[in-house]
Amino acid sequence: MASLADQDSFRQQHEIPADLDFQPRGAMITFPTPDGKPASAYLMASTDPARPWLLVIHEWWGLNDHIRREAEHLFDSLGVNVLALDLYDGQVASDRDQAGQLMQSRDPRRLESIIKGALDHCGPNAVISTIGWCFGGGWSLRASILAGTRSKGCVMYYGMPVEKAADLMPLQAEVLGLFASQDEWINEDVVRKFDALCEATGKRFSYTFYNADHAFANPSSPRYNSTAATDANATALAFLRNKLR
């Protein structure tokens, strides 16, 4: 996914997020990671600590107010612990070039360490699902792979899937993919190859293509498609409610 940042057409598909009048109800927390560096996340905590966990993974911009607001919406809709991870270690992009540089410069080992630290924070017996968009959609899948038997569901909005059977084999969660038929990059060929890989490795994968473009579920994008986004979001929530029980 990071290599796409070199393409001007891909960069232009991502509008600079508008400023929000956002009053957070959650809290930023820190937690240790296996590589010894602390990580952070935005937490919306259930009053019942035994409730399941949803890991939210941001787009290429970083953990901005748009993602925090989405985390709060998911919390209100699902009533579970919601943890929006900061995969950029406090950095948030303000323009496309910076976003591309951040996405390309991140060491996958560090990203995996952040996710493992978050999984440890959830606890060894936690019921976990994941959700993400674009860059975060791909890492939603990888987070569910890292969660092993704790992960029950993974939602990928137009995210790049893994391509190798060895990378997919540890996955235990069911995967829901929400894609755009007009997407130039995470296109039907990419998705159908992943579907074949899932079938070959015995993984559960269902997906829907919407007659829309990349970022169709992002209300700050001019490619926002309210019809597609409304259906995709309802499908995602129904899927997560079923998994986070």
Image (cartoon, rainbow, N blue to C red):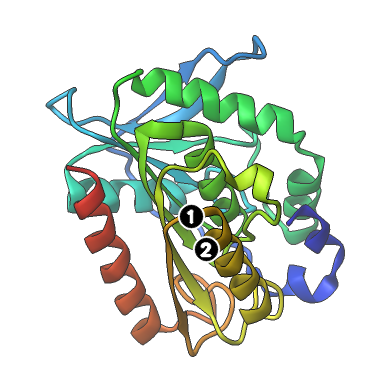
The residue under the point 28% across, 33% down is 127
Please, what secondary structure does the residue beneath circle 2 have?
helix
Please, what secondary structure does the residue beneath circle 1 have?
loop
Q: Nearer the viewer, residue 165 or 23?
A: 165
Q: Which amino acid type is shown beneath numbered disc 1?
A: Gly
| Residue 81 in sight | yes
* Residue farthest to the left, as pictured: 48
Residue pointed to by mark 1: 202
Q: Quadrant of the N terminus?
A: bottom right
* Residue farthest to the top, as pictured: 36
Q: Position of residue 178 (x, y in %)?
A: 45, 70
Q: Quadrant of the C terminus?
A: top left
Q: Is residue 106 left or right of residue 68?
A: right
Q: Position of residue 22 (x, y in %)?
A: 37, 49
Residue pointed to by mark 2: 199
Label 2, residues with CA under 10 Å away: few <14, some 14-19, many ≥20: few
Q: Gap in Å between the C-alphas at discs 2 and 1?
A: 5 Å
Task: Decide: is 139 above or below 235.
Answer: above
* Residue farthest to the bottom, as pictured: 211
Q: Position of residue 222 (x, y in %)?
A: 54, 81
Task: Decide: is 70 above or below 128.
Answer: below
The residue under the point 53% across, 43% down is 63
Q: Position of residue 83 (x, y in %)?
A: 38, 35
Q: Is residue 19 left or right of residue 82?
A: right
| Residue 89 in sight | no
Marks 2/1 in contact by CB < 8 Å: the verdict is: yes
Q: Which amino acid type is shown beneath numbered disc 2?
A: Glu
Give residue 43's quadrant in the image: top left
